Image (cartoon, rainbow, N blue to C red):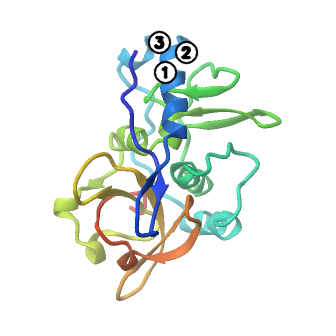
């Protein structure tokens, strides 16, 4: 099965866009060489849990501990760690993983019907591509969570603490970066993220991007 190439995370806010292809290439290799569940993508997804709502306190506690560090219980995907980090926050906030009946001993599971990360040993991990890949994460979660697209988005009305924000260049193309909403006041919202580690970035400081919202706050 040929895996469509996607941009995952790029170095942001430096005036230029530096594309990181390492994670893309790794996922592509897993998809083309692993026949572990080769027919699973054709199955009807019947294992989804349904719409989930995050525990904000637990999620923010995780952010406070790990926004500028890497949790050894998860694989490190620097410099493409954005979606991995957001997935970790969601899990810490009580969002339930969806796992296959059998998990392969290591590597990336490219079946987009699952969302999980499992540590198998010292620096040995099995992860779904939906856990670490921006577009695959959207493919999985848009089945159960409310999504607000850029053309319908009003930032102050629609975005709440606990939501996931995905970024796309105004010129179009794939969504390439993900962040998590940690704070909202009367003027703006603030985001945490990895790649360029951010604890609470004012969304107004992100220029030239479209925002897609995946709702976990409600």
Q: Mark 1 and mark 3 in contact? Answer it, CB < 8 Å.
A: no
Residue 65's disc number:
none
Label 3 – label 2 distance at C-alpha: 7 Å
Q: Mark 1 and mark 2 in contact? Answer it, CB < 8 Å.
A: yes
Residue 38's disc number:
3
Q: Which residue is drawn at 45% across and 70% down?
A: 161
Residue 96 in the image, given as x and y percentages of width and height:
55, 44
Label 1 – label 3 distance at C-alpha: 9 Å
Residue 88 in the image, given as x and y percentages of width and height:
60, 52
In the displayed structure, 19 sits above or below 196; it is above
In the displayed structure, 138 sits above or below 62; it is above
Residue 14 in the image, given as x and y percentages of width and height:
46, 69
Residue with the most extreme bottom position: 186
Residue with the most extreme right position: 122
Q: Nearer the viewer, mark 1 or mark 3?
A: 1
> Helix, strand, or loop for circle 1?
helix
> Helix, strand, or loop for circle 2?
loop
Residue 34's disc number:
2
């Amino acid at each position: 099965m040929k895996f469509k190439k996607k941009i995952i995370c790029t170095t942001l806010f430096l005036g230029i866009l530096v594309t990181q292809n390492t994670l893309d290439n790794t996922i592509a290799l897993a998809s083309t060489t692993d026949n572990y569940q080769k027919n699973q993508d054709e199955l009807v997804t019947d294992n989804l849990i349904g719409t989930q709502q995050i525990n904000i306190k637990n999620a923010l506690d995780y952010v406070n501990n790990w926004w500028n560090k890497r949790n050894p219980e998860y694989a490190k995907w620097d410099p493409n760690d954005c979606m991995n980090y957001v997935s970790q926050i969601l899990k810490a906030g009580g969002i339930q993983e969806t796992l296959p009946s059998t998990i392969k001993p290591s590597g990336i599971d490219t079946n987009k019907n699952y969302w999980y990360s499992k540590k198998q040993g010292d620096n040995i991990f099995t992860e779904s591509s939906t856990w670490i890949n921006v577009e695959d994460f959207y493919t999985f979660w848009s089945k159960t969570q409310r999504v607000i697209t850029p053309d319908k988005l009003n930032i102050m009305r629609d975005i709440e603490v606990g939501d996931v924000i995905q970024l796309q260049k105004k010129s179009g193309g794939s969504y390439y970066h993900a962040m998590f909403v940690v704070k909202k006041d009367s003027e703006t919202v603030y985001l945490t993220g990895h790649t360029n580690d951010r604890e609470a970035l004012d969304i107004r400081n992100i220029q030239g991007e479209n925002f897609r919202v995946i709702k976990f706050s409600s």
